[in-house]
């Protein structure tokens, strides 16, 4: 028999707040329903799709981390994107999108939001100056500019402050910062209105949950909250608890992968069988100057191109013993993917040429639980066979 009232007072000195795993919340009587549910004059849980104290705690911590007025958590990074765009856009609106943005965000705009009369202008960010010029040319027409940086796999960056100037003050700028969470990048300081994350990556940092986040101005967050209330892409209490716990170590984890990233990127750059390395901390990165301006650390994802065919590259990747062959980043384990077998599997030679992804392209996502020396040793033995 479930007691009608639980006495939790004796435990309110728990250092960690409890995890709330409840679909609904009870009221003591009709007066409590009126005050707690309708008038909201007394604090009370309402219903599991609208709020959960564990989310609220993690949302407050996320706002502190991103230096945002307010934040919301979602069931996935994509859920955060979809809900934000549904809330911020209307039929007839025009949007700018980088052609290097995450594949499913592009699909969302081209195949789903387009059905509701939203028009997309897609431009490459490879030449940052050119991108700013394209945004400026559309000034007055565009309602929202969506950015993502660094992009994958080339880690391209955007001159965010100049995009803000070019777009004008009334345009909403959203930025997917999944690859560059705090303390590496603070987009809201540079004129971005809303920062979006796949919290599946660095924010949760253990490779064990799927979650998303939107942080920004209160007024925008409240609009998005209304859509989340209705559409329901919410976290359960336990997943919110895991995210909350992970955030305690975000800065430590980022510090570690930032140091690992720089060391391994430099190692790769010194290898004769490696043609190019894309890592924002290397002077050879085409957007190194933007990295100096905007980033405080360069993260744990490194893309490199081998001077090899697709088959030879696959042999090298297959010889690696330490990383899992998988597509994610920000996890404790190191992951590796050959780009033309994962994200660009269906691209023709011509399409690969246009986006600048040779068949020898490999993306390495460093796991903070691995030692740099062990990763280098493993890369060494795999690359050694290239000269056989
Ligand atoms: N944004 C970026 C840059 C991503 O890499 C991903 C996923 O890989 C997403 C958004 C989507 O996030 P999720 O997988 O949590 O829905």
Image (cartoon, rainbow, N blue to C red):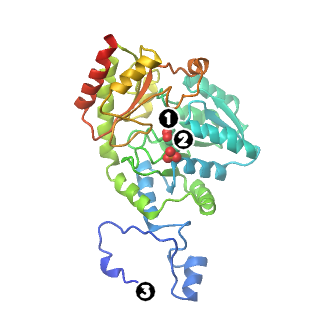
Secondary structure of residue under mark 1: loop
Q: Mark 2 — residue?
A: 175
Image position of 15 (left or right of 78): left
Where is residue 3 drawn, in percent x and y? 42, 86
Tell me if 322 is positioned left or right of 149 in this view: left
- The answer to whether marks 1 and 2 mark residues whose Cβ atoms lie closer than 8 Å is yes
Specify whether residue 139 is in view.
Answer: yes
Image quadrant holding the N terminus, namely bottom left
Quarter of image, res 278: top left
Q: What residue is shown at x 37% (from left), y 46% (from top)?
A: 205
Rounded to the nearest angstrom, the CA distance separating label 1 from label 2 is 7 Å
Point out residue 340 in the picture as x, y percentages from the top left corner: 50, 25
222, above or below 3, in the image? above
Q: Out of 191 and 280, give the one closest to the viewer.
A: 280
Q: Residues within 10 Å of mark 2 (few under 14, many from 20)?
A: many
Separation of marks 3 and 2 at Cα, in angstroms = 49 Å
Residue for badge 3: 1
Which residue position holds label 1? 149
Local secondary structure at mark 2:
strand
Badge 1 or badge 2: first in the primary sequence = 1
Is residue 337 shown above or below 95? above
- Classify 10 Å Cα crowding around label 1: few (below 14), some (14-19), many (20 and above): many
């Amino acid at each position: 028999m479930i007691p009608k009232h639980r006495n939790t007072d004796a435990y309110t000195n728990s250092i960690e707040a409890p995890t709330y795993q409840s679909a609904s919340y009870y009221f003591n009587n009709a007066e409590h329903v009126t005050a707690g549910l309708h008038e909201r004059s007394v604090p009370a849980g309402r219903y599991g799709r609208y709020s959960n104290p564990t989310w609220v705690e993690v949302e407050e911590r996320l706002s502190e981390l991103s230096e945002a007025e307010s934040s919301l958590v979602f069931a996935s990074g994509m859920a955060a994107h979809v809900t934000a765009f549904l809330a911020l856009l209307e039929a007839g609106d025009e949007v700018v999108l980088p052609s290097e943005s995450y594949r499913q965000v592009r699909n969302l705009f081209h195949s789903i939001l387009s059905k509701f009369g939203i028009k997309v202008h897609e431009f490459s960010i490879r030449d940052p100056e050119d991108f700013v010029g394209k945004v400026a040319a559309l000034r007055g027409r565009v309602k929202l500019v969506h950015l993502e940086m660094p992009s994958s796999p080339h880690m391209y960056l955007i001159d965010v402050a100049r995009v803000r100037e070019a777009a004008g003050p009334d345009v909403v700028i959203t930025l997917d910062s999944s690859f560059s969470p705090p303390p590496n990048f603070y987009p809201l300081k540079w004129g971005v209105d809303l920062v979006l994350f796949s919290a599946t990556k660095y924010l949760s940092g253990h490779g064990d949950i799927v979650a998303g986040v939107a942080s920004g101005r209160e007024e925008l967050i409240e609009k998005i909250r209304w859509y989340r209330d209705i559409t329901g892409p919410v976290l359960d209490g336990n997943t919110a608890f895991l995210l909350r716990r992970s955030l305690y170590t975000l800065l430590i984890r980022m510090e570690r992968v930032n140091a690992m990233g720089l060391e391994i990127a430099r190692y790769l750059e010194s290898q004769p069988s490696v043609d190019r390395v894309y890592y924002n901390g290397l002077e050879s990165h085409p957007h190194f100057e933007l990295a100096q301006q905007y980033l405080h650390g360069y993260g744990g994802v490194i893309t490199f191109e081998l001077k090899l065919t697709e088959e030879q590259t696959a042999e090298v990747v297959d010889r690696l013993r330490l990383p899992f062959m998988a597509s994610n980043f920000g996890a404790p384990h190191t992951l590796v993917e050959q780009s033309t077998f994962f994200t660009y599997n269906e691209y023709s030679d011509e399409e690969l040429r246009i986006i600048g992804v040779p068949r020898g392209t490999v993306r390495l996502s460093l796991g903070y639980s691995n030692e740099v020396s062990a990763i280098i040793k493993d890369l060494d033995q795999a690359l050694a066979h290239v000269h056989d």
